Amino acid sequence: MPRKAPEIKLSDAEKAQLEKLSRSHSAERRRAERATILLACAEGKQNQQIASELGVSMVRVGKWRSRFALHGLSGLNDEPRPGKPVIHDAAFRNKLLAQLEKTPPEGLSRWDCPTLAATLNVSRAAVWRVLRKEGIHLHRARSWCISTDPEFAEKAADIIGLYLDPPLNALVLSVDEKPSIQALECKVGYVQTRDKAWVKAYQSTYKRHGTLNLFAALNVATGEIKGQTTQTKTRDDFRQFMAAIIEDEPPHREIHVILDNYCTHKRNEEWLAVVRCIFTTHRRRPAGSIRSKFGLVFCHVRHSSKPALQALRISTMRLQPLSNATTSVLNRSNGEDVKSKGRRLKILV
């Protein structure tokens, strides 16, 4: 007596999932084929008819009909295949991760793959597979800086408030300096690479012609930058620069200056009495500060065949309009982003 094939009945959720899988362009072809077979079975078609329409064997149709009848949608997956038993299981992974938390051997500042393999008495490939799966890169390093200023949270909130809602008719400046800009003489020109592209090139050897210092102030409301070059970066140079910045401002105008706590910025009692300064911890400058503009300026004067200090000074000052063409900090910043950053800063403190 011939055997009767199991009847396939699909729920609405199962039918929708199988239809999605059968139409998918990213799923494996064999899984899409299995879904198509089951949809045809649910329509009441016989194995012989399905095999003829899809160009597959009756044995394959019967196999996936029976698997679905027994296991449901999970029956579409391949069964575990026989093969070499697993050597490095979850216990090995946990052991390796625990080893990374220990101090590396004497003479090494960090763990590496060969050292881990020798310590755990396994192959380097086994260590490398676990590290790659966990997304661990032993050769990469990042630095962090945590402010020790007890008033850092209050200062950060004050700076963010000035960016988002500056006082009416007030002037908000972000001030910093770029010290020791080297005037280097080297040969420059263009060379052709192996892929026939022409790129700017400069000779690796150079001749020094002194250094130059740049003081700069960014108006956070308009994005305008004002700068001044000096031979030194003393307290007197800083006072002269700030005096030139605010000399055209009305006496009654409120002025807020955001700058770091470098020694040349402090102990200027007469000047500090005129403006309100917010000193941020060194290396903890606020987002959108003038320092972010220095990279834009000096990528144009980094290598030059005109090394004289006067030529460097002229090139630096001519590039100020290029930075001024950028939009202001207030226009580019998203209020919610800045607020969320402020909340994270308070959490870190």
Image: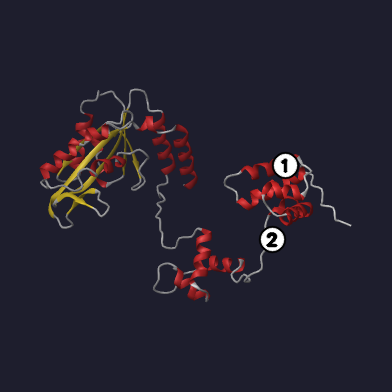
Disc 1 designates what residue?
15
The kind of residue tagged 2 is Glu
Residue situated furthest right in the rendering:
1
Give the Cα separation between the discs numbered 1 and 2. 23 Å
Residue occupying the point 37% across, 26% down: 167
For the N terminus, the quadrant is: bottom right
**Label 2 Cα neighbours within 10 Å, binned few <14 / some 14-19 / many ≥20:** few
**What x and y, as percent, mark residue 170?**
33, 26
- The picture quadrant where one finds residue 240 is top left
Q: Is residue 319 left or right of residue 73?
A: left
Q: Is residue 180 left or right of residue 83?
A: left
Residue occupying the point 50% across, 75% down: 119
Above-or-below relation of 84 to 271:
below
Disc 2 designates what residue?
79
The kind of residue tagged 1 is Lys
- Of residues 133 and 172, the one nearer the viewer is 133
Q: Dot 2 lies on which element?
A: loop
**What x and y, as percent, mark residue 171?**
31, 28
- The picture quadrant where one finds residue 92 is bottom right
- Of residues 120 and 60, the one nearer the viewer is 60
Residue occupying the point 34% across, 48% down: 283
Considering only order in the chain, which callout, 2 or 1, is on the residue closer to the N terminus?
A: 1
- The picture quadrant where one finds residue 43 is top right
| Image mark count | 2
